[in-house]
Image (tube, rainbow, N blue to C red):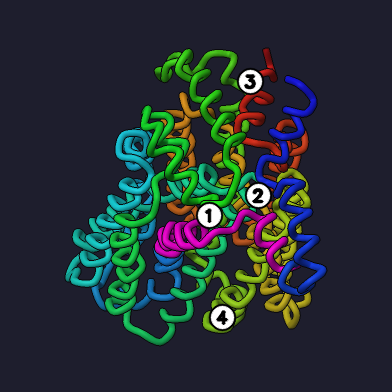
Amino acid sequence: MKEETRVHLLDSNIITNNNLHKLDDDANNNNNNADEAAIVDSLNITPTLLLTTFFTLLGSLSLGFTIGYIAPVQSEIIEELGLSTSENSLFVSINNVGSAMGAILCGKLADYLGRRRALGLADILYVLGWLSIAVAQDAWLLDLGRWMLGVAMSICTFVIPIYIAEFAPQNLRGGFVVLYMLMCSVGSSLVFLLGLIVPWRTLALIGIIPSLVQIISVFFIPESPRWLMMIGKNEEFEAALRQFRGAAADISQEVFDIKMSAEALQEKPKVSLLQLLQKKYAYTLTVGIGLIAFSVLVGVTGVLAYSRSIFESAGLSGITGMVSLSVMQLPSVVLAIILTDKCGRRPLLMISSVGVCVGCLLTASAFTFQDYRVLERFSPYIALIGILVYFGAYAIGLGGVPYVIVSEIFPLNIKGLAGSITSLVGALLGWLVVYAFNFSLEWSSSGTFFVLAGVSGMTLIFVARLVPETKGKTLEEIHLQMSSVWQ
C-alpha cells in the first residue's frame, strides 16, 4: 500500500485539509462558531449516529436493570413467596442458564436477522420475562421469567457492542462501545435505588419500559453498514453509511476499505466449529474468550447479586451500601468512556485488574479482622471502601473494555460463531460464579475475596502478555494484525 493511501486509511474519519481551510476562513469571521463546527465535524457526529447509539443502548439499560434486580428485592421475594434456600439459589442463577442457551444462538441470530431485528427479539423476551416475574405466585413462573431475561441478556451482550463498533467512526469507536457499560451501570444504579422504595412486582413492570421504547425504535434506525455489505446489499450499505456519516461527509475511502474487506472475506467462507479451531484463529479466540472469561471470574456477578448481604455481614446497613454503590458506579464508567480512546485498551485493563485486586484484598482483610476480632471498629468501613474500589476499578476497565476488544477483533466470517462461543463461555462461567458464590461466602467471606484477588492478578498477567492494543486502528487493520500472530 502506498504511503499516501496508508495515511488516508488511518485518518479516513478525520476532516480533510480542504475542510480545515474552510473552517479557518470561517473562524476569521466567527471564531466561536467555527471552533464548535470543527470539533463536531472532526468527531463525525451526526444526529443519526447519536440517535441510533441512544436507542441501541436502551438494551444495555435493560441489561443493567436485569443484573441489578435481585440485590434490593431478594429478601422481599423470599418472604412473600416463601422460597426455600435451593429455590432462591435457582432463581438468582437461572438467568445465567438462559444466557448460556442464548449464547448458542445469538451469533446466528445476529447474522441471519441483522443487528436491529436481533435487538427487537431480545426486547420481546425482556417484556415477557418481566411480565412473568411481575405476576408470579410461585417459583416456577418466577424462574421462567428470569430464564427469558437471561436469553435476552445474552443477545444484547453480543449484539450491542458489535452493532455500535460497526457503525461508529474509527476515532470514536472505543468510547461509543464503552457507553454500553455506562448504560448497564445506569440500569444497575436505577434498580438499586428504585428497589428501596417500590415493591418488587412494580419494579419488574418498570423494567419493561426501555424494551418497549427500543422495539419501536428498531423500525427507524439504520442497519449496520458492514452487515449489509456482508449479505451483498451494496446500495443499502452505502445509504446506511451515508446516514451515519452525514450527507456532506466524504465516505469514499471508508466505502472502499469495507468493500475490500468484504471481498477478501468472500474468498474465506464462513467457518464451521472445527474450522474455527485452526491455528490461524487460535490467537484471536484466545484473546476474545480469555478477556470475557477473566472479566467474569473476578466475581462481579456474584458480588453484585449478594452485595446487600455482603454489606450487612460486614456490619454495614444494606441500604447505605447499596446507595454508595449506586452513586460510585456512574463516575467510574464515565471516566472509562473518556479514557478508552485516549489511553488505549491495554492500560485501562491493567489498571482495572490492579484496582480490582486491591479492592478484593481490602474486603478480605476487613472480614479477616472480624474473624480475629482485630480493628472491629474500623472493619466495616474498610469493607465498604474495598467493595467501592472493587466496583469502581471494574467499571473503568474490565466491565466494558473486553466487550470493546471482542467487538473489534473477530472478522465478519467468524464473528457470529466466535461471538456465540465467547458469549457461551461468559454465560456458563457467570452461572458458575453466581451459583457458587453464596456457598463460598458461607465457607469464608475473607477466603472468597482472597481467591478473587488471585484471579485478578492472573487477569493482569493475561492482559500484559497476550492482549493487543486496538486503539486508533480500523477494524480491517485489527483483523490483519491479529491473523499474523501465532502463524
Q: Quadrant of residue 3?
A: top right
Residue type at the position of mark 3: Ser
Counting from the top left corner in percent of width and height, residue 255 is at: 54, 34
- The correct choice, above or below, for 21 with respect to 323 in the image is above
* 2 vs 3, front mark: 3
Q: Amino acid at mark 4?
A: Val
Residue for badge 2: 451
State which tag comes first along the sequence, 2 or 1: 1
Of the image marks 1 and 4, the number of the one nearer the N terminus: 4
Tag of residue 440: 1
Q: Earlier in the sequence, mark 2 or mark 4?
A: 4
Q: Is residue 103 above or below residue 370?
A: above
Classify 246 as above or below 459.
Answer: below
Quick one: label 3 or label 1, which is nearer the N terminus?
1
Left or right: 232 in relation to 331 = left
Task: Name the disc covering residue 304, or none.
Answer: none
* Residue 319 position within the rendered picture, expressed as x and y whole percent measured from the top left: 52, 83
Q: Quadrant of the C terminus?
A: top right
Q: Residues within 10 Å of mark 2 (few under 14, many from 20)?
A: some
- x, y percentage for residue 434? 46, 53
Q: Which residues are magenta?
A: 35-63
The label number, if any, that marks residue 483 in the structure image:
3
Q: Which residue is mark 4?
A: 323
Looking at the picture, how far across and down is residue 53, in whole percent? Answer: 49, 58
Residue located at (47% from left, 75% from top):
190
Residue at the spot x=61%, y=70% of the render?
Answer: 330
Residue in the foreground of this view, choosing between 446 and 159: 159
Three-letter residue code for mark 1: Ser
